[in-house]
C-alpha cells in the first residue's frame, strides 16, 4: 500500500452538495497524492451506498486512493483500497475478513487507543482531533506533543482536526505521515490549491 500524505474526508453535508461530484473530480485529479474518504455516519445503508456507487468510479478514474469509512461490506463491494474504522466499528481482523483486499486504518484519539490499534494490526492510524475543530466542538485538541508520542508507536500517522497549512508544517515536524481535512478542502474556492498548501511540507522535503 502506498499511503497518500493528504486524506480528504466527506461528511453528510459534503455528500449533499449540489456540486459534490464536480468538486470530487477536481480533488481526485490530484491522483496518488490524495486519499478520498467516503464517509457519512448519519446515513442509512441505502443512502450511503448510493453515494459511494456514484463517487467511487470518479475517485478510481483519477488514480486517487479510495477509502470507505466504517463499512467494510461497502468497501468490499467497490473494491476500495482501504477501510477506515472508528472506535465503535469492527476490529481490524474482523474488517479484513469482510474486505480482505483493503488496507485497514483505525481512527484514534490518544495513546491508549493507538496502542490497541497497533496491537490489532492497523495499517495506519488517523489521530485527532489534534486542534479544536468545528466537527467536534466539544472536544479539546490533543496537541502536537501527544501526536508525536503516537508517531513513536511505529505506524504511519495521519493527523486530523483543525488543519491549516501552518499547522500542517507542525504535523510534518512531528514525524507524522500526513494530514486529513474536511472543510479545509471541500469548503474553499480552489480545493486543489488548498490541497497543495496542506501537502507542501512533505513535498518540499521529498
Image (cartoon, rainbow, N blue to C red):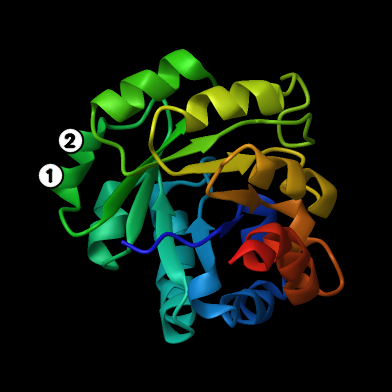
Residue 15 vs 182, above or below: the answer is below
Asked whether the residues under the numbered discs 1 and 2 touch, taking CB atoms below 8 Å apart as contact, a structural biologist would say yes
In the rendered image, which residue does mark 2 sit on?
93
**Which residue lies most toward the top here?**
112
Left or right of 11, for residue 50:
left
Element class at badge 2: helix
Element class at badge 1: helix
Q: Which mark is residue 117?
A: none
| Residue 170 x %, y % | 74, 41
- The picture quadrant where one finds residue 116 is top left
Residue at 49% in and 84% down: 62
**Which residue lies most toward the front here?**
205
Residue at 81% in and 49% down: 164
In the rendered image, which residue does mark 1 sit on?
97
Near-viewer residue (79 or 141): 141
Residue 123 vs 2, above or below: the answer is above
Quarter placement of the C terminus: bottom right
| Residue 55 x %, y % | 49, 73
Quarter placement of the N terminus: bottom left
| Residue 75 x %, y % | 30, 57
| Residue 29 x %, y % | 59, 83
Question: Can residue 16 be spotted in the picture?
Answer: no
Answer few, some or many: residues within 10 Å of disc 2's Cα (few below 14, many 20 plus, some between 14 and 19): some
Residue at 73% in and 48% down: 168
Near-viewer residue (26 or 126): 126
**Which residue lies most toward the right here?**
189
Left or right of 13, for residue 95:
left
Residue at 51% in and 41% down: 41
- The picture quadrant where one finds residue 142 is top right
Residue 58 vs 114, above or below: the answer is below
Amino acid at each position: 500500500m502506498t499511503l497518500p500524505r493528504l486524506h480528504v474526508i466527506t461528511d453528510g453535508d459534503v455528500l449533499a452538495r449540489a456540486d459534490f461530484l464536480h468538486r470530487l473530480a477536481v480533488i481526485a485529479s490530484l491522483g496518488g497524492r490524495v486519499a478520498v474518504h467516503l464517509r457519512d455516519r448519519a446515513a442509512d445503508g441505502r443512502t450511503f451506498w448510493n453515494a459511494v456507487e456514484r463517487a467511487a468510479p470518479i475517485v478510481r478514474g483519477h488514480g486517487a486512493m479510495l477509502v470507505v469509512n466504517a463499512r467494510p461490506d461497502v468497501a468490499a463491494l467497490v473494491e476500495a483500497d482501504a477501510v477506515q474504522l472508528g472506535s465503535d466499528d469492527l476490529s481490524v481482523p474482523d474488517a479484513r475478513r469482510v474486505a480482505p483486499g483493503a488496507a485497514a486504518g483505525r481512527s484514534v484519539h490518544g495513546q491508549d487507543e493507538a496502542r490497541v490499534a497497533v496491537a490489532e494490526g492497523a495499517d495506519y492510524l488517523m489521530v485527532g482531533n489534534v486542534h479544536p475543530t468545528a466537527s467536534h466542538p466539544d472536544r479539546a485538541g490533543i496537541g502536537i506533543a501527544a501526536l508525536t508520542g503516537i508517531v513513536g508507536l511505529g505506524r504511519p500517522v495521519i493527523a486530523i482536526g483543525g488543519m491549516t497549512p501552518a499547522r500542517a508544517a507542525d504535523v510534518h515536524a512531528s514525524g507524522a505521515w500526513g494530514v486529513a481535512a474536511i472543510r479545509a478542502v471541500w469548503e474553499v474556492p480552489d480545493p486543489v490549491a488548498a490541497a497543495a498548501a496542506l501537502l507542501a511540507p512533505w513535498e518540499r522535503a521529498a
